């Protein structure tokens, strides 16, 4: 008996996406990096796929956010012990919080890819190399305070508002942050914008020392 398989367009797009993701990981580890424009020149078919992927990731973010909220509500109403309630809230912040930030960063990157593919990036903009250098600056180096380890995250007092109990989480794996007290954060560029009132361009120049 002969078994044949057929792949749908959606399956093929996921296959391409997985391959492109693997290439990006290799690119991030290499000393010689291709910028976003060069990657799109190598894979021009990505222009047709990116809008679909943005929608899929935005749906994923909405679903994941709802799950995190449901967990926090269950913890609030069903766990009476103070320490246990605190522990499980911190667990959700460290795990679900990190995943939400990963999704947000991924959506932003895909939207930048789409702008480049459509030729909508204005001349005189920052170079991809400058933006990447800024994104590589560890968030913890911007804070002049002790930080404690909490699972995969670092925790300290929020630099964006006054507080007595630390609620500012730094996720080193993605070099992103989020304050669960004032609900602000993001990548290192966005943190600098929030801290100093800079534009995106000013924040990048601040981080790379220009």
Image (cartoon, rainbow, N blue to C red):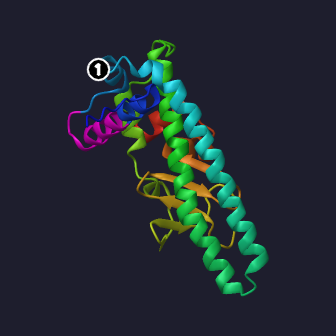
- Residue 201 location in percent, x, y? 51, 29
Q: Image point 63% across, 39% down: which residue?
A: 197
In the rendered image, residue 139, in percent from the top left (x then y), is placed at 46, 53
Q: Is residue 82 above or below residue 71?
A: below
- The image shows residue 43 at horizontal and vertical percentages of 33, 21
- Quadrant that contains the N terminus: top left
Point 62% across, 40% down: residue: 59
| Image location (x, y in percent) of residue 76 | 76, 74
Q: Which quarter of the image is occupied by the C terminus?
A: top left
Question: Within the image, what quadrant is residue 159 found in?
Answer: bottom right
Q: Is residue 103 left or right of residue 19?
A: right
| 82 displayed left or right of 45 | right
- Judging depth in this view, the residue of 185 and 97 nearest the camera is 97
Q: Which residues are magenta?
A: 18-32
The residue that appears at 36% across and 34% down in the rendered structure is: 15
Residue pushed farthest left? 31
């Amino acid at each position: 008996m002969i078994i044949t398989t057929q792949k749908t367009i959606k399956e093929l797009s996921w296959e391409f996406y997985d391959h492109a993701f693997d290439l990006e990981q290799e690119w991030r580890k290499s000393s010689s990096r291709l910028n976003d424009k060069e990657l799109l020149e190598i894979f021009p078919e990505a222009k047709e796929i990116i809008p679909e992927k943005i929608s899929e990731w935005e749906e994923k973010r909405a679903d994941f956010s709802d799950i995190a909220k449901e967990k926090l509500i269950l913890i609030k109403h069903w766990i009476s012990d103070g320490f246990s309630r605190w522990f499980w809230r911190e667990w959700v912040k460290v795990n679900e919080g990190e995943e939400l930030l990963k999704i947000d960063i991924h959506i932003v990157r895909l939207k930048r890819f789409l702008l480049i593919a459509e030729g909508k990036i204005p001349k005189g903009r920052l170079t991809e190399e400058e933006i990447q250098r800024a994104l590589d600056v560890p968030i913890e180096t911007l804070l002049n305070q002790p930080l404690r380890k909490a699972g995969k995250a670092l925790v300290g007092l929020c630099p964006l508002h006054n507080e007595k109990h630390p609620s500012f989480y730094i996720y080193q794996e993605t070099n992103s942050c989020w304050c669960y007290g004032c609900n602000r954060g993001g990548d290192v560029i966005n943190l600098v914008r929030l801290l100093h009132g800079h534009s995106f361009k000013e924040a990048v120049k601040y981080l790379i020392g220009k």
